[in-house]
Image: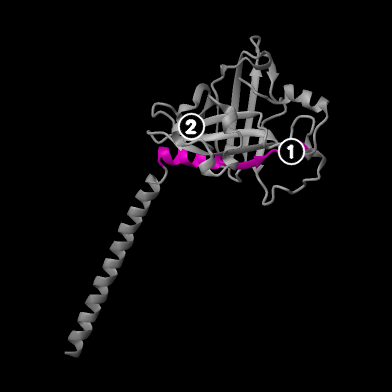
Amino acid sequence: MGSGEEDTGGGGGAVRGAVLKALVVVGGVLLLRRLRRSTTRWDHARAVADALSGEKFSREQARKDPDNYFNLRMLTCPATEMVDGSRVLYFEQAFWRTPEKPFRQRFYMVKPCPKEMKCDVELSSYAIRDAEEYKNFCDRSKDQRPQAEEVIADIAEHLTTIHLSRCGRGKRCLYEGSTPPEGFPNNWSGASYCTSDLSIHKNGEVHIWDKGFNDEGNQVWGTKAGPYEFKPAPKSKYDDMFSPLNFSAPLSLEKKLDKAYVIDDQ
């Protein structure tokens, strides 16, 4: 009986070992399938929407190259979601010193690229029907903001569309893309069309390069030195509050903005 019990124990151990191996194999297969399925077209759209959201500044660029860049605040937050799942974000930009007076306001619509296109995310910008009503939208409590139905009703004319793709291995960015080479109609400051380049980086930075061109193809607005680099807000937005960058700029600097950046563009 003793030897019989030992044989039974050994057989049980072998069975348990086989079961464990089978579970490991099955688990591995399931994990692999899950990983393969983990990034869907909508996952990319959600990742881009999340990365764009928040408060970001071009402070470091303004410090290093004040002739070409201003210390701007970029603020983006969710506004609503469309029936098809597209996310609508509210976006505004202002000088750091006057965040309550944004000079640019937009709705962004974020959704997957059409299946026939070789890109991951479609990011479109739209004018706002009553922009004044949306000033500082993200800074307000939800009950003080225009509600979802109002947001959808206030999405006005289409302005631009950028097609974003995942960045290749070894790059600092997560997604990057641009408007078509021919750009989109724009009549601000002598322009006839505009283009935009955008990249989202692993450290939370968002780089934006907007440019306007006339009929001859000459750039008439937007920076020529490179994109604006917006970095996530520091823990305290009052850091460096006494920096000269944060005081009112003289009139000459304000005039320089006409060529360095877009104010109230169409």
Q: Secondary structure at mark 1?
A: loop
- Give the percent coordinates (x, y) of residue 76: 57, 38
Magenta span dominant secondary structure: helix
Up-down relation of residue 122 to residue 55 (above or below): above
Q: Residue type at mark 1?
A: Arg
Residue range corresponding to the magenta coloring? 40-63
Between residues 111 and 147, which one lies in front from this camera angle?
147
Q: Which residue corresponds to the image point at 58% horizontal and 34% vertical from the top-left?
A: 91
- Give the percent coordinates (x, y) of residue 8: 20, 80
Would you name the residue on which mark 1 appears?
A: 97
Q: Residues within 10 Å of mark 1 (few under 14, many from 20)?
A: some
Q: Is residue 94 left or right of residue 113?
A: right
Up-down relation of residue 13 to residue 35 (above or below): below
Would you name the residue on which mark 2 appears?
A: 151
CA gap, disc 1 and disc 2: 28 Å
Q: Which residue corresponds to the image point at 66% horizontal and 9% vertical from the top-left?
A: 216
Q: Secondary structure at mark 2?
A: helix
